[in-house]
Amino acid sequence: MKRFRKKYRKPRRPWDKALLEEERKIMIEFGLRRKKELWRAKEELRKYRRMARELNARRDKEKEKVLIQKLYRLGLLPSPSATLDDVLSLTVKDLLNRRLQTIVYKKGLANTIKQARQFIVHGHVRINGRRIVYPSYLVSRDEEDKITCDIKPNMPKAVAQEQPAQQPKAEVSVEVKEGG
């Protein structure tokens, strides 16, 4: 039986105020539900940066080219002729921008980042006709143009005009008798 290992590492100082504020901003910006999602992205980035440092020390051009090609296909690097310095300058935001949830929102298939997550989890988003239900799915450059959504995020104007606007509730006054 295969033993699964954690794919993330918790911060060394979990109650560091600056770190908490930074993580909170990133979570709101990318619509993450749990810190674990952010920690997993940081660990993935750490892995690529570690590989780049090792390849830089070994001067292995062949493996360096393989790593750069892989990161280019994922959409993390701007061109296939990037260098290891470009790999080392990647940030966690670059990785989070390649998540399916973020791309669905940025393509305009959803009104908000949270609605994008909901469409994905409910199975309305497809890549190449395949239903993907994981908001953390990393979308490659090839797949980016093949993302479709079964549901349109905006309500048609004709339907919106037919529905009457909600009337504010009337205030109810209650008299209290004193004495007993």
Image (cartoon, rainbow, N blue to C red):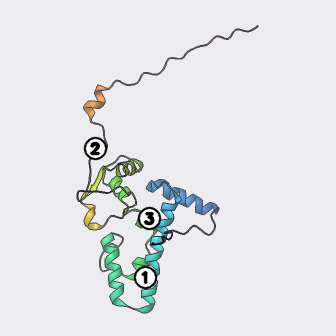
Pinpoint residue 153: horizontal percent, then vertical percent: 31, 43
**Position of residue 61 in the picture relative to residue 5 (left or right):** left
Hey, what amino acid is under mark 2? Lys
Residue at 32% across, 82% down: 66
Q: Tell me, for residue 93, which label it has, or none.
A: 3
Name the quadrant of the C terminus.
top right
Viewer-nearest residue: 15 or 157: 15
The kind of secondary structure element at disc 3 is helix
Amino acid type of the residue tagged 1 in the rendering = Ala
As measured in the structure, the alpha-carbon distance from the residue carrying label 2 to the one carrying label 3 is 27 Å
Q: Nearer the viewer, mark 2 or mark 3?
A: 2
Q: Residues within 10 Å of mark 2 (few under 14, many from 20)?
A: few
Q: Which residue is mark 1?
A: 52
**Residue 82 at x, y percent in the picture:** 34, 79
Q: Residue at x 43, y 92 (%)?
A: 58
Amino acid carrying mark 3 in the image: Lys
Q: How many C-alpha atoms fall within 10 Å of the one at disc 3: few (<14), some, or many (≥20)? A: some
Kindly tell me whether residue 13 is visible in this rendering.
yes
According to the picture, the residue beneath numbered tag 2 turns out to be 152
Residue that protrudes farthest toward the front in the picture: 1
Q: Nearer the viewer, residue 107 or 149?
A: 149
Q: Earlier in the sequence, mark 1 or mark 3?
A: 1
Say what secondary structure mark 1 lies in. Answer: helix
